[in-house]
Image (spheres, rainbow, N blue to C red):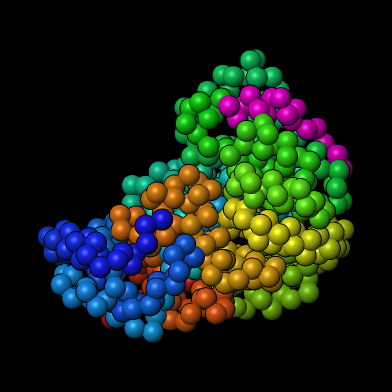
Amino acid sequence: MTPHLLPGARLVTATLAILVSVSAARADTVVIEHVTLLDGVHAPQPDMTVAVDGARIAAVTPSVIAHDLKGRRIDGRSRFLIPGLMDVHIHLRGGFDPGPTPGGEPAPPNRQEGVEALASFLYAGVTTVVDVGNRPEHILPLRADERAGRVLAPRIFATGNLITYPGSHGDRIAVRISDFEKDKALLDRHITEQQPDILKLTLEEEGWGSRPMIPLMPVELLGKIIRYYNLHGIRTTVHVSSELRSLEAIYAGSDTLAHPVIQGPVSDSFVKLMAAKKIPFASTLTIGDNYSRLVEHPEYLDQPLYVASFSAADREELRTRTRAEYKSRTWTAWMKVMTPIAEENVRKVHVAGGVVACGTDQSSGAATHRELELLAQAGIAPLDIIRIATYNGAVFLGKSDQLGSIDTGKLADLVLLSKDPATDINNAKSIVFVMKNGQIIDESQLPLAGGRQPRRFSGS
Ligand SMILES: [Zn+2]
């Protein structure tokens, strides 16, 4: 990383170059002044000025030498600027809902539900989501619409269908591969027609918690598929839940893992390996926490982010039918026991120097903030959580040159906060405005399931 505070002469030269380019900028340049920068990559930087020109960050400089930056001024005094949050493990609502009856027939894709869920992310300051398994006819048109600016949504990266062995985990939304040579045409079709931003595979025989055992993809086949996608320039992620399968996926060549180890405590050697190899993995604590939380604390549904993210009817359904159903499931009790273990696994790998990226395995901006709360509950410091939810997500995607920190030249996905998230990660909810691609989001235009919200930021 290039530090912002360059010594003496270099600072002046660099700043002059920036001033020239920003002065020549278009009229829509925005200059956020006297703000504290917190991106979890650089040390916190008070009294900084950030200029945004078009879609990108044009300058990041101490306010004391930023007077000549031209553009619309925004007062950042007593405010905090973080990069847009990233959720690297979602399954966008409307196409794939795990729901209470696994194995049940999925409903036809519901575009409106997808659009509303996407709005909930932007509303919560999540400017990038990674959909790691969905029905292609649901997620891919939304991805195209987002890229063309036709829908108000975070950046969408998607796998389309995931890939697994017939009958294995995620089979319902997967391309099923049993033999590499015989089924290669299916992989070619997936690559050509769905253009996955990242490939998702599953290496999971279940047989834990309350789930019966199912077929497992042979590791040799997994390795061949990973290599094939890498040879097409595509990164990979693998669903795993145990230390054994995590190791197998890593040595089969996977670039990332879609979950932490959740079946039991990790060994010290696994922690060391994760720190040595720096394989990014999605934290996904929220999915396991979700069941007992709804049973024991349904009042969380009254929090503002949930009220905005879900319709009144959906929240009522969760409070009544879904809650009763969760209450009766062995899975709920199992996940309540395992969530603290998963939290400790995540914390250990993080402390050792591994790369944790924020992911929820859910589909709302409210859930992304729940993930931040659980990372804090795991004992991870707020500033580290900001990095986990921003820069490390970009590393997960292989896009840390474009996204994830507050640096000149990066895409201007930013969130301005009124309270300091470095003292309490819950302050990441104190949103003044959300900026994606250099544009401040007008919340009154977001089609939230909970109804239209007023615009948060009036312009100063
Ligand atoms: Zn998932």
Image x and y of residue 27, in percent: 15, 65
Residue at 77% in and 65% down: 340
The answer to whether residue 313 is left or right of residue 16 is right
Count of residue discs: 0
Position of 264 with respect to 169 (left or right) is right
Please indicate whether residue 56 sits to the left or right of residue 297 in the image. left
Residue shown at 76% from the left, 48% from the top: 269
Whether residue 150 is situated above or below residue 368 in the rendered picture = above
Asked whether residue 453 is drawn in magenta, I would say no
Quadrant placement of the N terminus:
bottom left
* Residue 105 showing in the rendered view: no
Q: Which of 111 and 233 is in front in this view?
A: 233
Q: Can the viewer see residue 384 in this picture?
A: yes
Residue 283 screen position, x and y as percent: 64, 56
The C terminus lies in which quarter of the figure? Answer: bottom left
Q: Nearer the viewer, residue 349 or 301?
A: 349
Which residues are drawn in magenta? 212-227
Residue 223 in the magenta stretch? The answer is yes
Q: Which of the two residues, 320 or 457, is positioned nearer the viewer here? A: 457
Residue 58 in the image, given as x and y percentages of width and height: 25, 60
Residue drawn at (44%, 57%), measured in percent from left and top? 404
Asked which quadrant contains residue 68, the reply is bottom left
Residue 112, x across and y down, in percent: 49, 55
- Asked where in the image residue 239 lies, by quadrant, the reply is top right
